[in-house]
């Protein structure tokens, strides 16, 4: 938890992405660079049923899922770049 909190509180550069899963849900991701990798510090899943599950250092996991501990690579992972505003609209929902 301390690692993700420090990344979130100290971040000067943030990237935002969206990913559609095979069940029709949408994943929204906020990531920051750390040691040449992009580390996810916030992620929100909007399920096909309209449920929203959010994960960050403040809420790492629950019965629905968890904050990924894997770095992402936008060049290899099926991610669509989105604006910070779009991410925030979903996160604040």
Image: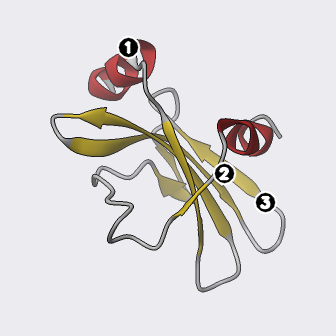
Q: Residues within 10 Å of mark 1 (few under 14, many from 20)?
A: few
**Residue reaching furthest left?**
35
On residue 52, the disc is none
Q: Residues within 10 Å of mark 2 (few under 14, many from 20)?
A: some
Q: Is 88 displayed left or right of 18 in the figure?
A: right
Of callouts 1 and 3, the N-terminal one? 1
> Mark 1 or mark 3, which is nearer to you?
1
Image x and y of residue 38, in percent: 31, 45
CA–CA distance in space, label 1 to label 3: 30 Å
Image: 87 above or below 56? below
Image x and y of residue 25, in percent: 69, 72
The secondary element bearing badge 1 is classed as: helix
Q: Is 24 displayed left or right of 29 in the figure?
A: right
**Residue located at (23% from left, 45% from top):** 37
Which residue position is annotated with label 3? 51
Which residue position is annotated with label 2? 53
Image x and y of residue 76, in percent: 32, 71
**Residue located at (43% from left, 14% from top):** 9
Of callouts 2 and 1, the N-terminal one? 1
Label 3 near label 2: C-beta < 8 Å?
A: yes
Which residue position is annotated with label 1? 10
CA–CA distance in space, label 2 to label 3: 7 Å
The secondary element bearing badge 3 is classed as: loop
Image: 35 above or below 23? above
């Amino acid at each position: 938890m301390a690692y993700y909190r420090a990344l979130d509180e100290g971040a000067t550069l943030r990237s935002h992405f969206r990913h559609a899963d095979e069940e029709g849900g949408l994943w929204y991701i906020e990531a920051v660079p750390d040691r040449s990798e992009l580390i996810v510090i916030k992620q929100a899943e909007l399920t096909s049923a309209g449920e929203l599950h959010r994960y960050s250092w403040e809420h790492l996991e629950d019965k629905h899922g968890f904050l990924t501990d894997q770095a992402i690579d936008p060049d290899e992972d099926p991610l669509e770049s989105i604006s910070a505003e779009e991410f925030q609209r979903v996160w604040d929902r």
